[in-house]
C-alpha cells in the first residue's frame, strides 16, 4: 500500500530566471497584448483546461492585490505581480513569448519556470534567461491525477502555487 502512494508523488524543481534588461532586437512588442482589469471567460476556461481545476477566485484575488492581467486575445494570458511574470498560460510558444515581451516592457524582471518533462521549456530557445543562483525550489504534487493540459503552461505564479 505505501509503495503505491509513492508513485502518486511527482517531484520537480522550479527555478527563478532573470530576464534581459531590454528586449532582444529580434523581438518586437505585439500590440495585440493588452492590459485588462478582469478575467475574460475564454482565459478562465483556458486556465481550467490547463491546470485541471478552477483557479478563478485565486486569480481575482491576485488582481485585487495589484497584479496586472495581460492577454493576447483568445490565445493566452499572464499575470504580472510586482517584478515577476507568471503564471503564463498560452496556447502556443509565440503567444507565451508575446506575453513575456509585454511583461518585460511593463517592468517584469524575472520568471519562475518549472523543470519537468511535462512542462514545455522551449522558452529558453527564444528568450535569454539567466538562472539566479540559490533560487531553486523543490516542488511536489501529491494526490489523485487531474486532467491537465500542461503543454499550455509556461511559468509559475509563485513557488507555492501555480
Image (cartoon, rainbow, N blue to C red):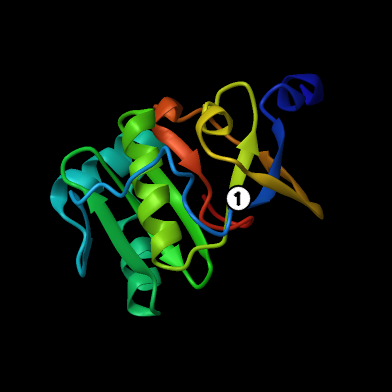
In the displayed structure, would residue 46 be above or below residue 59? above
Q: Quadrant of the N terminus?
A: top right
How many circles with numbers are drawn on the protein?
1
Q: Residue at x 63, y 44 (%)?
A: 129
| View extreme (bottom): residue | 65
- Asked whether residue 52 appears in the rendered view, the answer is no
Task: Give me the residue at 31% from left, 41% from top.
Answer: 48
> 143 or 63: which is nearer to us?
63
128 relative position to 4: left or right? left
**In the rendered image of this protein, does residue 19 appear above or below residue 42?**
below
Q: Secondary structure at mark 1?
A: strand
Residue in the picture at 73% in, 20% down: 4
Instruction: Say if 6 sits above or below 143 in the image.
Output: above
49 on left or right of 15? left
* Nearest the eye: 98 or 29: 29
User: Quarter of the image holding residue 147?
Assistant: top left
Quadrant in the rendering for residue 53: top left
Crowdedness near tag 1: few (<14), some (14–19) or many (≥20) residues, C-alpha within 10 Å: many
What percent of the width, then of the height, locates residue 7? Answer: 71, 21
Which residue shows up at 35% across the image and 48% down it?
Answer: 99
Relative horizontal placement of residue 50, taking residue 138 as reference (left or right): left
Q: Which residue is mark 1?
A: 112
Residue furthest to the front: 25
Amino acid at each position: 500500500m505505501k509503495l503505491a502512494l509513492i508513485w502518486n508523488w511527482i517531484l520537480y524543481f522550479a527555478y527563478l530566471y532573470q530576464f534581459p534588461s531590454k528586449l532582444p532586437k529580434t523581438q518586437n512588442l505585439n500590440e495585440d497584448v493588452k492590459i485588462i482589469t478582469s478575467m475574460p471567460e475564454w482565459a478562465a476556461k483556458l486556465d481550467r483546461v490547463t491546470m485541471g481545476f478552477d483557479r478563478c477566485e485565486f486569480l481575482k484575488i491576485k488582481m485585487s492585490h495589484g497584479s496586472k492581467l495581460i492577454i493576447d486575445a483568445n490565445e493566452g494570458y499572464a499575470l504580472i505581480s510586482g517584478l515577476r511574470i507568471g503564471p503564463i498560460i498560452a496556447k502556443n510558444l509565440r503567444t507565451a513569448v508575446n506575453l513575456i515581451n509585454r511583461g518585460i516592457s511593463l517592468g517584469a524582471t524575472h520568471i519562475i519556470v518549472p523543470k519537468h518533462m511535462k512542462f514545455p521549456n522551449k522558452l529558453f530557445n527564444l528568450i535569454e534567461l539567466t538562472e539566479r543562483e540559490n533560487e531553486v525550489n523543490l516542488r511536489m504534487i501529491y494526490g489523485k491525477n487531474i486532467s491537465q493540459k500542461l503543454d499550455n503552461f509556461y511559468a509559475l505564479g509563485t513557488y507555492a502555487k501555480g
